[in-house]
Amino acid sequence: MDTCSFPVRLALIGLVLTASPVIAQTSPPYGAPISLDLAQRCMASATAEAKKNEWNVTITVLDAGGHTMLVQRMDGVQFGSLEVAHEKAYSAVAFRRPTKTFEDMVVQGGTGLRLLKVPGVVPVEGGLPIVQDGRVIGAVGVSGATAQQDGQIAQACLSALQ
């Protein structure tokens, strides 16, 4: 049975996330949710990058509130990538930073390993917040290739929005 109350959990999460200079950095504030048009452009660009490299992946785009806008699962991708892509995107929008930031902290070991117990944190590259006019409007998550390849596909999504 879980003995930790919700307010205590929130305090612990805050403590873990501010314990490192990498996490304590200022994150952009939230903005209005991503529009369908922008989400579709993001998805098209990410899909093109995946196809160009012959990487079959699942791509998920969430709005600023963590709600699903678009999901695409390419042929031949394991069904487990559906949830992983969503969780990478959710982690990126919930904490307003790339999931690669968390991956790097875990790789360093020490206090960075505390992130493994923080709910909602996915310490694997492939999730990026979508920022427009200095505000987080959504996130993209990719799963199905290597973490670095997933990150490259997610970056293609952001490139389409500039």
Image (cartoon, helix red, strand yellow):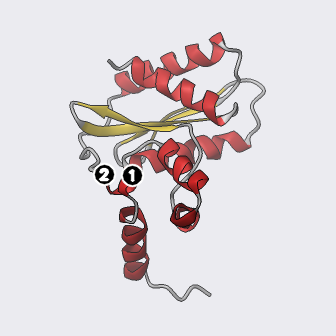
Q: Residue at x 40, y 60 (%)?
A: 20
Amino acid type indicated by mark 1: Val
* 41 versus 133 height, above or below: above
* 110 versus 48 height, above or below: below
Q: Residue at x 74, y 40 (%)?
A: 79
Which residue is disc 2 drawn over? 25
Seen in the image, is 66 located left or right of residue 126?
left
* 48 versus 62 height, above or below: above
| Percent x, y of residue 161 | 35, 20
Which residue is disc 1 drawn over? 22
Asked if the residue under mark 1 is in contact with the one under mark 2, i.e. CB atoms within 8 Å, the reply is yes
Q: Residue at x 53, y 21 (%)?
A: 46
Point out which mark residue 39 bears. Answer: none
Amino acid type indicated by mark 2: Gln
| Percent x, y of residue 124 | 59, 45
Q: Could you tell me if residue 72 is visible in this image?
A: no
Q: Residue at x 51, y 58 (%)?
A: 120
| Percent x, y of residue 121 | 51, 56
In the rendered image, the quadrant that contains the N terminus is bottom right
- Secondary structure of residue under mark 1: helix
* 93 versus 158 height, above or below: below
